[in-house]
Image (tube, helix red, strand yellow):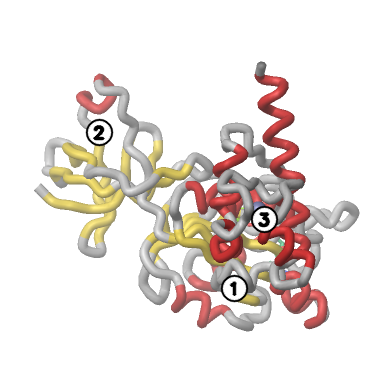
């Protein structure tokens, strides 16, 4: 038996990448009986095709993690892509994507694309909020190539790109993988918004090693299944302060002697991130009230 990684699923078949070759396999019936669906990113054991039958997927190895959108397993990095302009970045969505990656323990990369469309001051402001969290930030222009090589070299293992529609996720992959020619959407001139052009899920081998998966952009996300107490753990920059809060269970909202709030007040922690954090806490509490 051989081992490989599922890079694509189409109509009941799975393309498995192994030793620089792709093998088309059908999943054994036992998976369906067990209610298991193979996913892109799965490490699998398979029997390659013979002249009479197509390859056969025999075993799925334990998954390190699974992403729902896009449905991919064993992600190393979630790269959250925002555009410096066109479309204007939706920082609520950026932070929610970061939160979902933190909850899954997936390492995070932030990509600010389209730096050719904004002043360096504007880019500096966007990036500033994420310094304290110490996320790696790449400022790039997939159109003109700035920062792209460094980004390509920084991505190891499997990377999933996520972000608002039109931020340039497919364009970034096309730059990193020139022969590919993914479909790029025209931004509608009137709305300056993307057009949801990317639909299928496929793992692609990158120029500098590693694999990447493109995803359709989305515009909304909810934190409905997140516990309020869980949310603060998704902010690495609060780590240093939270154990000094007066209350052990401090949620850093209105509690007295809260060191997180203190740090925001005196400028040690970014205010924008904190404001959105408070907004998300309210959102979560709202869901919970409605659920009862
Ligand atoms: N000026 C400029 N335009 C860019 C850059 N990167 C991408 N674009 C343009 O932005 C538009 C959207 O790019 P896509 O790559 O389709 O964006 P996407 O994030 O894949 O969009 P969805 O698939 O809808 O989520 C296209 O018109 C690109 O040509 C850049 O660095 N600078
Ligand atoms: Mg796309
Ligand atoms: Zn606190």
Sequence-wise, which precedes: disc 3 or disc 2?
2
Question: Foreground residue, 125 or 258?
Answer: 258
Question: Foreground residue, 59 or 26?
Answer: 59
User: Percent position (x, y) of residue 49?
Assistant: 16, 44
Residue 129 visible within the image:
yes
Which residue is under mark 1? 137
User: Percent position (x, y) of residue 43?
Assistant: 26, 49
Sequence-wise, which precedes: disc 1 or disc 3?
3
Question: Foreground residue, 250 or 20?
Answer: 250
Pointer 2 local density, CA inside 10 Å: few below 14, some 14–19, many at least 20: some
Q: Residue at x 55, y 65 (%)?
A: 240
Quadrant housing the C terminus: top right
How far apart in space, not on screen, are marks 2 and 1 (Cα)? 39 Å
Residue 49 visible within the image:
no
How far apart in space, not on screen, are marks 3 and 2 (Cα)? 36 Å
Above or below, 230 against 189 in this view is above
Q: Residue at x 73, y 63 (%)?
A: 262
Which residue is under mark 2? 27
Q: Are marks 2 and 1 in contact (CB under 8 Å)?
A: no
Q: Residue at x 86, y 57 (%)?
A: 189
- Seen in the image, is 135 located left or right of residue 116? left
Above or below, 254 against 214 in this view is above
How far apart in space, not on screen, are marks 1 and 3 (Cα)? 13 Å
Above or below, 46 against 108 in this view is above
- Which image quadrant is residue 192 in? bottom right
Q: Residue at x 25, y 43 (%)?
A: 62
Which residue is under mark 3? 94
Does the residue tagged 2 have its C-beta within 8 Å of any atom of ligand 2?
no
User: Percent position (x, y) of residue 71?
Assistant: 46, 42
Q: Quadrant of ligand 1?
A: bottom right
| Image depth: mark 2 or mark 1 in front | 1
């Amino acid at each position: 038996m051989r081992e490989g990684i599922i890079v694509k699923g189409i109509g009941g078949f799975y393309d498995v990448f192994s030793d620089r070759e792709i093998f088309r396999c059908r999943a054994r019936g036992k998976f369906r009986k067990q209610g298991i669906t193979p996913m892109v990113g799965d490490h699998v054991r398979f029997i390659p095709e013979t002249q009479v039958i197509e390859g056969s997927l025999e075993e799925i190895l334990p998954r390190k993690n699974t992403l729902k959108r896009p449905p991919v397993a064993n992600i190393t990095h979630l790269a959250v892509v925002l555009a410096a302009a066109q479309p204007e970045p939706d920082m609520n969505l950026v932070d929610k994507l970061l939160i979902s990656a933190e909850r899954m323990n997936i390492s995070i990369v932030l990509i600010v694309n389209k730096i050719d469309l904004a002043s360096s001051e504007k880019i500096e402001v966007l990036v500033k909020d994420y310094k304290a969290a110490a996320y790696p930030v790449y400022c790039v222009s997939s159109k003109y190539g700035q920062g792209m090589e460094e980004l390509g070299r920084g991505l190891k293992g499997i990377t999933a790109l996520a972000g608002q529609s039109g931020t340039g996720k497919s364009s970034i992959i096309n730059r990193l993988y020139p022969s590919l020619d993914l479909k790029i959407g025209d931004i509608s001139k009137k709305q300056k918004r993307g057009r949801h052009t990317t639909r299928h899920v496929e793992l692609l081998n990158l120029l500098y090693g590693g694999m990447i998966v493109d995803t359709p952009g989305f515009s909304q996300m909810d934190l409905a299944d997140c516990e309020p107490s869980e949310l603060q753990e998704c902010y690495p920059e609060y780590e240093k302060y939270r154990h000094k809060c007066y209350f052990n269970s401090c949620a850093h909202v209105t509690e007295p002697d809260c060191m997180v709030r203190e740090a925001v007040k005196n400028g040690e922690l970014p205010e924008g991130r904190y404001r959105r954090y408070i907004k998300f806490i309210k959102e979560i509490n709202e869901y919970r009230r409605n659920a009862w």
